[in-house]
Image: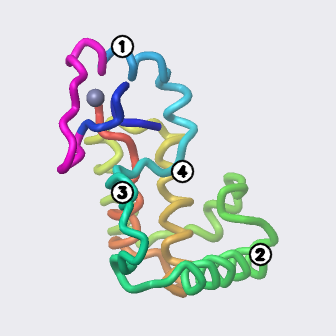
Amino acid sequence: MNPCPCGYLGDPSNRCRCTPEQIQRYRAKLSGPLLDRIDLHLTVARETTILNAPAQDGESTVQAASKVARARERQLQRQGTANAFLDLPGLRRHCALSDADRQWLESACERLGLSLRAAHRVLKVARTLADLAEQQQISREHLAEALQYRPAAG
Ligand SMILES: [Zn+2]
């Protein structure tokens, strides 16, 4: 989605011409329950029009795609399904956290006002980040990154 009706909000090279009222009306159209169903919220810079611009982190599309394929394969071998489709028992079994990390996540979710369902989705995203890093155990770093992909409050 665009961040605002004109699409330039937060863009360093173009000025957004929307009024705060227009932006608010635009966002209100996307209801909370809808936004709650989206796992990853990222603010990305507008696509560059420079055709030979190098990839920012040096990882090519092909490398990224094979990393994703490996992460998916890990999930299927471990639990027979993708992380996104884990049920509650699967979540407990395959997304186990240390006591300290579980408490950390609980207090973070409380602070951010996340529902239990949203917390489970954070856990699944963290599991996927761990799989991408080829780690068996979800670390606090993965949890923190997964939390970043939740929508900002408001
Ligand atoms: Zn705008």
Foreground disc of the pair 1, 4: 1
Q: Which amino acid type is shown beneath numbered disc 2?
A: Leu
Foreground disc of the pair 3, 4: 4
The relative height of residue 145 versus residue 37 in the rendered view (above or below) is below
Contact? badges 2 and 4 (CB < 8 Å): no
Q: Which amino acid type is shown beneath numbered disc 4?
A: Arg
Mark 2, ligand 1, within 8 Å: the answer is no
Contact? badges 3 and 1 (CB < 8 Å): no
Answer whether residue 15 is magenta in the image. Answer: yes
* Element type where label 4 sits in the image: helix
Mark 1, ligand 1, within 8 Å: the answer is no
* Element type where label 3 sits in the image: helix
Density class for disc 3 (Cα within 10 Å; few <14, some 14-19, many ≥20) is: many
Q: Earlier in the sequence, mark 1 or mark 4?
A: 1
Report the span colored magenta: 10-23
Which residue carries the number 4 mark? 121
Q: Which amino acid type is shown beneath numbered disc 1?
A: Arg
Q: Earlier in the sequence, mark 3 or mark 1?
A: 1
Residue positioned 52% across, 61% down in the render: 125
Residue positioned 54% across, 87% down in the render: 134
As measured in the structure, the alpha-carbon distance from the residue carrying label 2 to the one carrying label 4 is: 18 Å
Q: Earlier in the sequence, mark 2 or mark 3?
A: 2
Ligand 1 lies in quarter: top left
Q: Which amino acid type is shown beneath numbered disc 3?
A: Leu
Q: Earlier in the sequence, mark 3 or mark 4?
A: 3
Residue positioned 21% across, 42% down in the render: 14
Which residue carries the number 1 mark? 25
Density class for disc 2 (Cα within 10 Å; few <14, some 14-19, many ≥20) is: few
Which residue carries the number 3 mark? 105
The relative height of residue 24 versus residue 152 in the rendered view (above or below) is above
- Say whether residue 91 is left or right of residue 22: right
